[in-house]
Amino acid sequence: MLRLDFTGKNVLVTGGGRGLGKACALADADCGADVFIGNRREDEGMKTVEEIRAMGRRSGFKRTDVAVKQDVDDLVTAAEEFFDGRIDVIMHAAGVISTYDFMLAEESEIRRLFDINIMGTSHMLQAGLRHMMPRRSGNIVTTASIAGRTNLGMLEHYCVSKAAVISLTQAGAKKGAPCNVRVNAVAPGIIRTRMWEEILDGMATGFHGSEGGRTAVSEEEREKNWNDSVRNLIPLGRAQQPEDIAFGALFLSSDLAREITGQVLHVDGGCCMV
């Protein structure tokens, strides 16, 4: 039986303090990898580190805002030092969502979204490729979204930011391929993470903003919106779990995917078939 064995692998995960990033970090460790965490909130990041160490793996942390290029460069340097010079896999999971309607989003909100999702991905790809290309080895997995493949009729600027992530991933794949560095993206579907809680807030407010949604409707209405979304958008009829995305990312960064680069793996229950 095939099993993904990451024993001896060194993995760097951004956004590893919660949600999909944390699920990926724990899955990597469960497969035998040592894992270094970059996260904006130290308390969240260190909690993941402690859980990984409890699994018997090495783990370290550096506070990182991926929107800041120097932060990302410093993160890669810190991971290099922690791993004695070699990073095998980078899982870039840091990202945010915006629940403002297209016509209501102010410039500051759009810049926040693009700085983290687009510039953050660009910073991570640049720094990761600079580390891996001279070593002629490595894997980078970014986090796209089904929103990057199709405009959802809502969250329009978020859709744009994730479409850019896909394009940046393909650019990174072309740049890294001559040096045997693979770059792919995993595209999550509908998962009840904090991001989807924000979307439910948006549904409650007519996407006028991310504040106040939970007081606008009852919890019963909130759950109805969630259940309707799952039923109407996912052919398999069930929401994905964070570990489902982690499994996809593990595959893409494993030797089983050695001939795969520049691709987007949808883990979405059939939500986006392109």
Image (cartoon, helix red, strand yellow):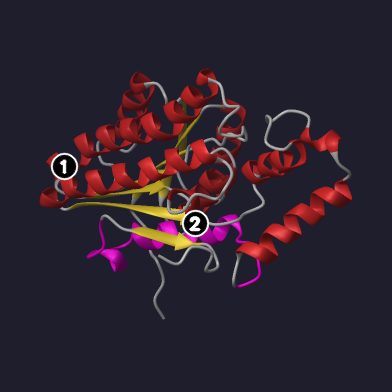
**Marks 1 and 2 close (CB-CB < 8 Å):** no
**Relative to the observer, which residue lies in front, 213 or 4?**
213
Q: Which residue is mark 2?
A: 246
In the image, residue 238 lies in the stretch drawn in magenta: yes
Q: Which residue is mark 1?
A: 133
**In the displayed structure, does residue 159 sit left or right of residue 170?**
right
The quadrant of the rendering that contains the C terminus is bottom left
Examine the rendering and report whether any part of residue 43 can be seen.
yes
- Label 1 residue SS: helix
At horizontal 50% and vertical 36% (from top left) the residue drawn is 157
- Residue 145: percent from the left, percent from the top? 47, 50
Instruction: Answer above or below: position of 96 versus 150.
Output: above
Specify the amino acid type for callout 2: Ala
- Residue 188: percent from the left, percent from the top? 51, 55
**Relative to the observer, which residue lies in front, 225 or 245?**
225
The quadrant of the rendering that contains the N terminus is bottom left
Q: Which mark sits nearer the N-terminus, 1 or 2? A: 1
- What count of labels does the image hold? 2
- Residue 136: percent from the left, percent from the top? 14, 48
At horizontal 54% and vertical 35% (from top left) the residue drawn is 96
Examine the rendering and report whether any part of residue 66 can be seen.
no
At horizontal 64% and vertical 47% (from top left) the residue drawn is 193
- Residue 250: percent from the left, percent from the top? 41, 59
**In the displayed structure, does residue 53 sit left or right of residue 196?**
left
Report the Cα–Cα distance between label 1 and label 2: 25 Å
Residue numbers of the magenta segment: 236-261
Instruction: Answer above or below: position of 182 versus 205.
Output: below
Specify the amino acid type for callout 1: Met
At horizontal 85% and vertical 50% (from top left) the residue drawn is 221
